[in-house]
């Protein structure tokens, strides 16, 4: 897997474009005052960056080369810059400016668990810092070394640990190395008829170890579970040796060590392998599009779906703002598309009484045998109908399914045109979701007003559970010319995060804590909770050599 762009998302030769989406330019002009034809900002040229010399003693350098071989120890400037941060908005903006922060001094690429162990031992002996690196897609500041760090910083890139080691077909468990990227891991499993079913939007560029270390969630979590549910056992190289848990379906062995590793962001050790639940690749898979008259209808319908016997693989409903944005990113319609869309609008307005400005687009996915899928569609269809919604067929769902891994490129497109866009996501019980939504919308708009900028915020509900769901907000604005854009960004982002915790929701459903969300941890898990985490990290890693400064 090739490294991502040093200053943006994804592959070098892939970029988002407005040119084949005729409605996008007018949409951004009217909502953000943004002219899509004008590129006003570009990343600094890599050649012009001031990359400081690495701080790496000859002894440590030799020990690392002994551990993994000379070719797998790199002090190349581009390698160090790519491994310095993740892909959060703050990361992208600072990288684009040429503000590189505390770069790792060296990037080390072990080929197996033994090499991970020897590298960690060398790091501890030299009192160096070691930061595990999966795909580098962290969006919560989980990868950056503290600015004031004086010790040598090693970025441990796990990408050579990329194999599906074995599948226990009877137990439906797969042993997979932690550096395997999403597409590679699925390819290896699919070849044997299995799937992990974990598809985060960052799937193409993130790894199993990264998912586990951040408690990730994929779009099909309704059926497959989050990575925390899928991960049955872990192998972790820690300062005191190899931690191994057993892949049993349940255990009563005190507080769960497996759970402690989940979400540990590299602070407890390096995950080298996990045993995960897998399922047979389904015979039939379909994602249907639905329209609801309003956001509250959509919300109520998905709550009823979660309470029903239906078990879809994907449940998602966008609010009216996100629905409008989705329609604005459609490719140029054909004449037939235009006729169909006019007919649909007329039908919705005249026959169904929809206000198309308030309607909400939803996607619900089904997987399994043909019979199972047909039964599920029927059961969900009845619930949708009760809430005034209607099914608009499979083609919007197919489009969403194809586009989902391309959407991350849009942030770079907006940054090139002087606008900041980012996401904040949370989870809350069903009874509180609508209050959380209202509180966040009000807080974000107050923040836009305070800054004197035109801003846009939209939301979708996804990842439904028995007792609640995730709300995923996306916001964008063009910062005022006076004042630092990251300070302005922080005003909006903090307002949203604060609204989460004030209204009883969590600081993050699946993006982790890192440094980005640390400010709200105590309000989320209480002071004794924070103290417990600090004691855990301090006990396992008394020298604070493992990814210091993250979480708590
Ligand atoms: C555009 C975009 C879309 C995203 N969409 C989603 C989404 O849909 N769902 C979701 O859950 N997340 C999403 N994320 C967030 C991110 O992709 C996840 O946090 C992901 O799990 C990180 O995996 P990674 O392999 O890139 O890890 P990295 O970013 O490399 O690392 C993340 C953290 O895990 C630690 N770590 C990595 N590997 C190991 C290991 N082997 N052992 C110990 N610690 C390790 C790192 O030290 C760091 O603290 C998105 C991010 C972006 C930028």
Image (cartoon, rainbow, N blue to C red):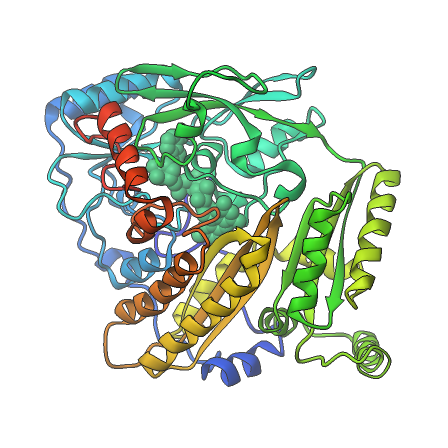
Q: Residue 143 versus residue 98: which sits nearer the camera?
A: 143
Left or right for 240, reference 219: left
Q: Residue 129 versus residue 225: which sits nearer the camera?
A: 225
Residue 346, x across and y down, in percent: 83, 82
Q: Residue 549 versus residue 57: which sits nearer the camera?
A: 549
Q: Residue at x 19, y 45 (%)?
A: 146
Q: Residue at x 47, y 46 (%)?
A: 510
Residue 61 picture quarter: top left
Residue 15 in sight here: no
Q: Is residue 185 above or below residue 396?
A: above
Q: Is residue 33 above or below residue 393?
A: below
Q: Is residue 229 above or below residue 146?
A: above
Left or right for 346, reference 474: right
Residue 64, x across and y down, in percent: 23, 23
Residue 421 in sight here: yes
* Quadrant occupied by the C terminus: top left
Q: Residue at x 64, y 44 (%)?
A: 466
Left or right for 405, reference 381: left
Q: Residue 50 versus residue 132: which sits nearer the camera?
A: 132
Residue 20 picture quarter: bottom right
């Amino acid at each position: 897997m090739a490294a991502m762009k040093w200053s943006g998302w994804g592959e070098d030769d892939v970029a988002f474009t407005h040119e084949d989406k005729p409605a996008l330019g007018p949409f951004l002009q009217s909502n953000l005052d943004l002219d899509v034809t004008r590129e006003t900002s570009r990343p600094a040229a890599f050649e012009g960056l001031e990359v400081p010399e690495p701080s790496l003693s000859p002894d440590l350098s030799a020990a690392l080369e002994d551990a993994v071989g000379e070719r797998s120890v790199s002090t190349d400037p581009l390698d160090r810059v790519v491994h310095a941060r993740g892909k959060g908005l703050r990361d992208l903006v600072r990288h684009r400016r040429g503000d590189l922060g505390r770069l790792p001094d060296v990037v080390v690429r072990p080929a197996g668990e033994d090499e991970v162990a020897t590298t960690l031992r060398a790091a501890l002996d030299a009192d160096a810092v070691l930061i595990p690196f999966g795909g580098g897609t962290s969006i919560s500041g989980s990868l950056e070394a503290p600015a004031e760090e004086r010790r040598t910083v090693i970025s441990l890139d796990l990408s050579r640990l990329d194999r599906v080691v074995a599948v226990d077909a009877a137990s439906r468990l797969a042993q997979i190395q932690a550096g395997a990227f999403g597409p590679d891991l699925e390819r290896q499993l699919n070849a044997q008829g299995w799937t992990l079913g974990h598809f985060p939007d960052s799937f193409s560029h993130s790894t199993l170890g990264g998912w586990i270390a951040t408690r990730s969630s994929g779009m099909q979590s309704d059926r497959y579970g989050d990575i925390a549910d899928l991960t049955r056992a872990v192998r972790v190289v820690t300062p005191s040796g190899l931690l191994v848990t057993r892949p049993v379906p349940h255990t009563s062995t005190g507080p769960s060590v497996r759970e402690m590793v989940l979400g540990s962001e590299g602070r407890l050790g390096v995950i080298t392998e996990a045993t995960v639940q897998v399922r047979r690749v389904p015979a039939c898979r379909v994602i249907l599009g639905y329209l609801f008259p309003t956001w509250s209808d959509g919300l109520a319908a998905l709550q009823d779906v979660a309470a029903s016997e239906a078990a879809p693989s994907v449940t998602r409903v966008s609010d009216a703002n996100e629905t409008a944005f989705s329609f604005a990113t459609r490719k140029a319609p054909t004449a037939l598309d235009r006729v169909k869309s006019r007919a649909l609008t007329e039908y919705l307005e005249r026959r169904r009484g929809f206000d198309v400005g308030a309607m909400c687009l939803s996607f619900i996915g089904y997987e399994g045998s043909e019979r199972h899928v047909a039964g599920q569609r029927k059961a969900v269809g009845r619930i949708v109908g009760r809430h005034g919604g209607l099914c608009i067929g499979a083609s919007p769902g197919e489009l969403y399914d194809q586009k989902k891994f391309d959407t991350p490129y849009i942030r770079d497109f907006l940054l090139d045109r002087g606008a900041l866009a980012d996401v904040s996501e949370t989870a809350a019980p069903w009874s509180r979701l609508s209050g959380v939504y209202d509180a966040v919308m009000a807080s974000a708009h107050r923040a836009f007003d305070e800054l004197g900028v035109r801003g846009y915020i939209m939301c979708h509900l996804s990842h439904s559970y028995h007792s609640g769901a995730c709300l995923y907000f996306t916001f964008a604005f063009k910062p005022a010319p006076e004042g630092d854009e990251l300070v302005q960004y922080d005003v909006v982002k903090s307002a949203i995060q604060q609204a989460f915790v004030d209204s009883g929701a969590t600081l993050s459903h699946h993006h982790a804590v890192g440094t980005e969300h640390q400010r709200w941890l105590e309000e989320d898990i209480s002071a004794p909770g924070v103290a417990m985490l600090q004691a855990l990290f301090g006990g396992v890693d008394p020298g604070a050599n493992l990814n210091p400064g993250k979480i708590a």
